[in-house]
Image (cartoon, rainbow, N blue to C red):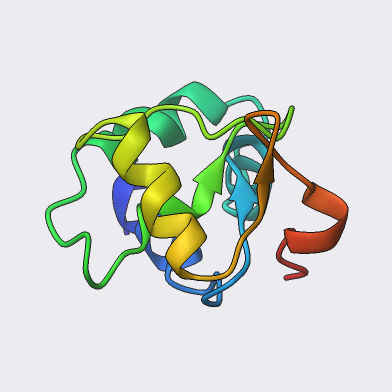
Amino acid sequence: MNFSEKVFKAVKRIPKGSVSTYSEIAEIIGNPDASRAVGNALNKNPTPIIVPCHRVVRSDGKAGGFAKGTKKKIELLRKEGIEIKNNKIDLEKFGCKF
């Protein structure tokens, strides 16, 4: 399994209404220093319906990038019940516990 496949497999485990961070995904797949590479892999996600890359956010709680734009990412997260206050997500409340 290549790096991107590992990232996609981990991201598929994030339930609706929860988020994870780029660095958490990097740790889960065994590459703790690869958070930027996780973001790059997700930017090329060929199946966003199956791999919910919008559920991966920055470790400071900000939404971070998204191929369809940050506004769209925030819209998708809000539709799933995730609250965003002052442009941040409460990772304690909405963080995924793997």
Q: Relative to residue 77, is residue 68 depicted above or below? A: above
Residue at image location 58% in from the left, 69% down from the top: 81
Residue at image location 30% in from the left, 43% down from the top: 72
Residue at image location 78% in from the left, 49% down from the top: 91
Q: Residue furthest left?
A: 46
- In this rendered view, identify the residue nearer to me: 60 or 30: 60
Q: Position of residue 55 (x, y in %)?
A: 49, 55
Q: Quadrant of the N terminus?
A: bottom left
Q: Quadrant of the C terminus?
A: bottom right
The image quadrant that residue 60 belongs to is top right
The image quadrant that residue 19 belongs to is bottom right
Q: Is residue 61 left or right of residue 48?
A: right
The answer to whether any part of residue 6 appears in the image is no
Q: Relative to residue 49, is residue 37 depicted above or below? A: above
Q: Relative to residue 96, is residue 60 depicted above or below? A: above
Q: Position of residue 43 (x, y in %)?
A: 26, 35
Residue at image location 37% in from the left, 44% down from the top: 73
- Total numbered badges shown on the rendered structure: 0
- In this rendered view, identify the residue nearer to me: 83 or 33: 83
The answer to whether any part of residue 98 appears in the image is yes
Q: Is residue 1 left or right of residue 88?
A: left
Q: Position of residue 96 (x, y in %)?
A: 71, 65
Q: Residue furthest right?
A: 92
Q: Is residue 14 left or right of residue 39?
A: right
